[in-house]
Image (tube, rainbow, N blue to C red):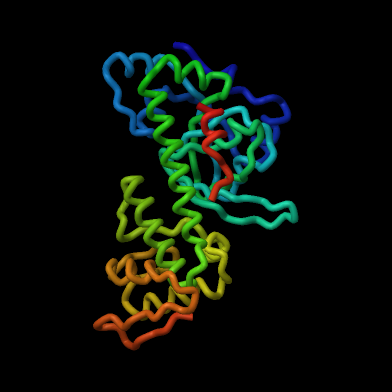
Amino acid sequence: MNTATDQAAHSADEAWYIHSSGAYREPRQTSVTEVLRLLGADMDAESRRWANSIELPLWRIPAGTTFLRADDLADAIHVVRFGYFKIIKIAEDGYQQVRGLAGPGDVLGFEGAALGRHPLEVAALDDCSVIAVPLSELRTLRHQSQPFDNALMRALGEQLAHAGDTASLMAPVAAEARLARFVLWMSARMAAHGESPRRFLLRMSRRDIANLLAVAHETISRSFSQMVECGYLKVDGREVEILDLAALQACSLSTRREKVEVARRPGSQRSATPAAVDFTNQQLQAVL
């Protein structure tokens, strides 16, 4: 079997950083077949034989670990096997802005492939596993396999679209509309990953959600409580269940900056009045 172990090996400094951060390379490897499966590629018999012949390294990242750091040299892209990551933009003054969420089938570090260094930080919200695709091998793999090339371009295009969706969450509307849009966005992401769109776990903390939506932490907690009181949601810790999808969608469509009037839902106790990635198409072309 061909192997990408040598090409995927980090420099001594980079290997020390990865090890000291808590992430570690697994002793076993996986084939390109798993990458294609995660990216949703269509494979014929010839493509499968080719993919089975090439191995790539696996990395395990414990929850709470910062896997990629802003301004570190980029030497690989990483395809998420399982678990979820939050994407963070760090301003010059050190302020950390949550910019999105990445889960199974998403590609981490593709911005760094174009820029040479990672512009964003990536931190694990769960115990995660990723497949490393060395940049030194990426062009060769793309040229050798049209399914691989097509799947990668589709995945990167989808992530650019997701970045636009994330930016819309911070539009200048009432906090309740932002939260409703966030819950619907999470629902769509869960559905895309084969999970329930109605009942799911919020990997991000309330503070991270508030940071993403550019509102106060207390505002997010209050808005969740009011949506529960009105019967839109059921919330148990970080587990959320959508009870009234139509009402939630109506709330998300408000474009007013002032507070959104949340109507009473039959059966509720009382009415309540609730209190993007910097990456251009030109840079994407540089990767592809």
Considering depth in this image, is 11 or 40 the residue closer to the camera? 40
Whether residue 110 sits left or right of residue 230 in the image: it is right
Q: Residue at x 54, y 65 (%)?
A: 210
257 relative to 6, above or below: below
Q: Residue at x 30, y 54 (%)?
A: 196
Residue 34 visible within the image: no
x and y percentages locating residue 122 in the rendered image? 58, 45
Q: Residue at x 32, y 18 (%)?
A: 48
174 relative to 266, above or below: above
Point out the image quarter for the N terminus. Answer: top left
Considering depth in this image, is 268 or 215 the residue closer to the camera? 215
**Residue furthest out toward the bottom:** 270
Residue 75 location, quadrant = top right
How many numbered marks, from 0 up?
A: 0
Considering depth in this image, is 146 or 30 the residue closer to the camera? 146
171 relative to 261, above or below: above
**Residue furthest out toward the top:** 1
Considering depth in this image, is 222 or 160 the residue closer to the camera? 160
x and y percentages locating residue 238 in the rendered image? 44, 63
x and y percentages locating residue 15 in the rendered image? 67, 30
**Residue furthest out toward the left:** 266
Q: Residue at x 73, y 52 (%)?
A: 92
Residue 33 location, quadrant = top left
Whether residue 73 sits left or right of residue 148 in the image: it is right
Residue 153 location, quadrant = top left
Residue 13 visible within the image: yes
x and y percentages locating residue 2 in the rendered image? 47, 12
288 relative to 256, above or below: above
